[in-house]
């Protein structure tokens, strides 16, 4: 499923518009993705649509205390990255909570920092548009194009 999200990010970054779910499902299937993964990715995209700008917080930073379950599943570097984004004024509390919720919903026993970074990038892309996340993409991709520490890499189609 995560490969599909990255594929969609790379494919639709500048258009900021996805085709209708049925058409997108056909395109993903034609690109070689499995039906079960396509369904999971489309559900994830539907969750991304629930993320909206928060006008109530006015960007006021907040302190996040992670639960034991979150600490055990979310990589320390990933949690630090969220703190960095929030401290920089890029990620507001409601979006941080959305990123944490989506990361915790993954089936991974431990969610790597790379995955947390990609989820955050997708959230910022949704909230701020493509132009505001291009510089951040270098941080997320690590600027090297090498494999991540956990051995995960996106499938290129």
Image (cartoon, rainbow, N blue to C red):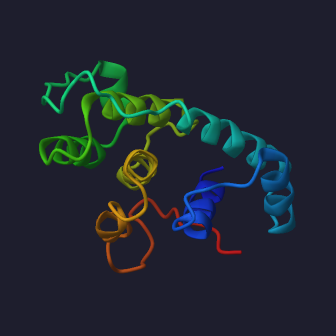
Q: Position of residue 72 (x, y in %)?
A: 34, 30
Which residue is depicted at the point 87% across and 57% down? 26
Q: Position of residue 110 (x, y in %)?
A: 44, 40
Residue drawn at (46%, 47%) of the image:
126
Q: Residue at x 30, y 20 (%)?
A: 68
Query: Which quadrant would residue 129 be assigned to in this image?
Result: bottom left
At which x and y percent is residue 145? Answer: 42, 79
Q: Nearer the viewer, residue 14 or 117?
A: 14
Residue 157 placement, left or right of 128: right
Image mark count: 0
Instruction: Work out whether residue 89 or residue 15 is closer to the camera in this orientation and state it.
Output: 15
Is 69 on the left-hand or right-hand side of 30? left
- Res 107 quadrant in image: top right
From the viewer's perspective, is residue 71 above or below residue 140?
Answer: above
Tell me if residue 101 comes above or below residue 24 in the rendering: above
Where is the C terminus found, in terms of image quarters? bottom right
Quadrant of residue 106 in the image? top right
5 horizontally vs 74: left or right: right
> Which x, y percent locates residue 36?
80, 44
Above or below 9: residue 60: above
């Amino acid at each position: 499923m995560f490969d599909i999200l990255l594929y969609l990010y790379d494919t639709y970054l500048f258009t900021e518009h996805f085709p209708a779910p049925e058409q997108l499902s056909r395109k993903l299937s034609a690109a070689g993705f499995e039906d079960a993964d396509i369904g999971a990715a489309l559900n994830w995209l539907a969750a991304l649509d629930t993320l909206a700008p928060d006008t109530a917080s006015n960007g006021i930073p907040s302190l996040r205390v992670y639960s034991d379950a979150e600490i055990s599943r979310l990589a320390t570097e990933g949690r630090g990255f969220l703190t960095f984004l929030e401290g920089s004024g890029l990620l507001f509390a409601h979006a941080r909570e959305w990123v944490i919720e989506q990361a915790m919903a993954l089936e991974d026993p431990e969610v790597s920092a790379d995955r947390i970074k990609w989820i955050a990038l997708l959230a910022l892309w949704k909230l701020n548009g493509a132009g505001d996340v291009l510089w951040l993409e270098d941080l997320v991709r690590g600027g090297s194009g090498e494999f991540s520490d956990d051995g995960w890499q996106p499938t290129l189609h």
